[in-house]
């Protein structure tokens, strides 16, 4: 019986640092390289895209990311895996939509139908006799308006088309009673399907006030169709190059997909199984078994929801015992401090702009000094900007 190759935790951390363009010897060559190195950059919190790029690109200028997103359009924001907003390069965009677009679109529609049917106003204007029909009419109205206008905000669309001005009533008779607009949720559903895209942003780089554009207009051509099986193969191929080795659990979670779809894609790729520390079994490309040479320890400050932090479900090999301090109960990773390929703490920005590192373990003086210097560099780069965390890490509540 032939034993499987073994890839230990130290080697896995080395791969992350080098392949994620975090090692000083292997920085990203630009914003597209940074996005592709991670498959995609998380964009749920607007500032994360820019802070993730800052961590990987020497002398990063936020105008470069803004130009790539809104002028050159070589990077595109897209609702994709796990109903999360990402920034992808164009080739990855088509594969991401093909892989998970139908699943996310169906999920968005199902959730809307549930809420429309439960709306607590059976005889009022917020009652929907035909929830499916309402969604279809709202979608058609968006396509009609964006077919003649280059870009419109969610508010402008609702002002122009009554079909989008729908609300649901929830919590009637309780202190939690309220009304929630449905128009923005229709836009999210259409975005997941690749029909529309977040276009020009009317706010600063750390804020989000997007307008909406037809995807074909934004790209200058129709999006290349990719079927789910082809998309899964392409996305898993990319993930293994960037994050591998990883487990089936990692892949299913990262994609927000099913074991069946992941297993089918793995069967079509030239991958092998390897033993990981802790008794787990992982997957890696057959031509990617040779160990990387170690990288020099370096200090890193990564933003909330950074792709490196959020790349694995089974993340003990880089988070250790600190998960409860940097991940919230929904699994969202906050602002993290890294040393030698591991999360060792977090960071926060004070009202005066200073960046403070919060260590969760004892470190050598050289590591503490390097993290302090990196914090000063981040504070200087941010200047007067004060990005507001959308998913504060638990350690921040204890300050």
Image: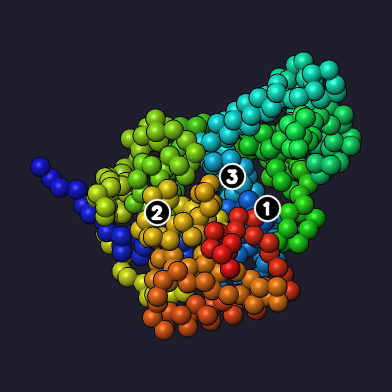
Cα gap from disc 1 to disc 3, whole angstroms: 20 Å
Q: Position of residue 53 (x, y in %)?
A: 58, 64
Crowding at dot 3, Cα within 10 Å, few <14 / some 14-19 / many 20+, comes out as some
| Mark 1 and mark 3 residues within 8 Å of each other at the beta carbon | no
- Identify which residue is drawn at 63% across, 51% down: 44
- Location of the C terminus by quadrant is bottom right
Question: Does residue 82 appear in the picture of this structure?
Answer: yes
Residue lying at 51% horizontally and 36% vertically, measured from the top left: 99
Looking at the rendered image, the quarter that the N terminus falls into is top left
Q: Quadrant of residue 389?
A: bottom right
Residue 209 falls left or right of residue 21: right
Q: Nearer the viewer, mark 2 or mark 1?
A: 2
Q: Is residue 218 left or right of residue 379?
A: right
Camera-side residue: 243 or 179?
A: 179
Q: Residue furthest right?
A: 160
The residue at the point 44 percent across, 57 percent down is: 323
Q: Which residue is mark 1?
A: 73
Q: At which x and y percent is residue 11?
A: 31, 62
Marker disc for residue 315: 2
Give how far across and how far down residue 260 sits, in percent.
39, 30
Q: Is residue 241 above or below residue 370?
A: above
Query: Does the CB distance between marks 3 and 2 fall below 8 Å?
Result: no
Q: Nearer the viewer, mark 3 or mark 2?
A: 2
Q: How is colour applied across the structure in the image?
A: rainbow
Q: Earlier in the sequence, mark 2 or mark 1?
A: 1
Q: Earlier in the sequence, mark 1 or mark 3?
A: 1
- Name the residue furthest top: 129
Residue ID for mark 3: 84
Residue farthest toward the front in the current orientation of the protein:
174
What secondary structure is found at the residue carrying circle 3? loop
């Amino acid at each position: 019986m032939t034993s499987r190759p073994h890839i230990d935790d130290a080697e896995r951390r080395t791969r992350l640092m080098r392949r994620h363009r975090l090692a000083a010897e292997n920085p990203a060559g630009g914003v597209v390289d940074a996005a592709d190195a991670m498959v995609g950059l998380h964009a749920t919190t607007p500032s994360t895209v820019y802070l993730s790029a800052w961590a990987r690109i020497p002398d990063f200028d936020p105008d470069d990311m803004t130009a790539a997103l809104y002028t050159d359009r070589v990077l595109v924001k897209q609702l994709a895996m796990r109903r999360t907003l990402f920034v992808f390069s164009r080739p990855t965009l088509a594969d991401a939509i093909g892989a998970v677009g139908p699943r996310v679109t169906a999920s968005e529609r199902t959730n809307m139908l549930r809420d429309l049917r439960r709306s607590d106003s059976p005889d009022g204007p917020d009652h929907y006799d035909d929830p499916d029909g309402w969604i279809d009419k709202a979608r058609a109205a968006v396509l009609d308006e964006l077919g003649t206008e280059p870009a419109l905000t969610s508010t402008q669309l609702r002002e122009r088309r009554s079909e989008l001005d729908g609300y649901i009533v929830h919590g009637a008779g309780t202190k939690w009673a309220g009304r929630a607009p449905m128009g923005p949720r229709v836009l999210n559903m259409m975005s997941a399907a690749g029909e529309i895209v977040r276009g020009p942003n009317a706010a600063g780089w750390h804020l989000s006030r997007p307008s909406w554009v037809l995807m074909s207009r934004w790209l200058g051509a129709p999006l290349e169709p990719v079927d789910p099986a082809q998309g899964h193969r392409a996305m898993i191929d990319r993930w293994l190059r960037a994050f591998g080795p990883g487990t089936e659990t990692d892949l299913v979670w990262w994609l927000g997909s099913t074991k069946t779809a992941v297993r089918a894609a793995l069967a079509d790729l030239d991958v092998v199984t390897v033993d990981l520390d802790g008794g787990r079994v992982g997957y890696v490309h057959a031509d990617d078994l040779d160990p990387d040479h170690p990288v020099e320890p370096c200090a890193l400050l990564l933003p909330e929801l950074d792709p490196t932090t959020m790349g694995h479900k089974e993340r003990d090999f880089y988070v250790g015992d600190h998960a409860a301090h940097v991940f919230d109960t929904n699994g969202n990773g906050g602002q993290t401090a890294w040393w030698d390929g591991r999360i060792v703490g977090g960071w926060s920005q004070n009202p005066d702009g200073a960046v403070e590192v919060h260590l969760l373990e004892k470190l050598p003086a050289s590591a503490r000094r390097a993290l302090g210097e990196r914090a000063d560099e981040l504070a200087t780069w941010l200047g007067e900007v004060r990005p507001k965390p959308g998913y504060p890490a638990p350690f921040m509540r204890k300050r």
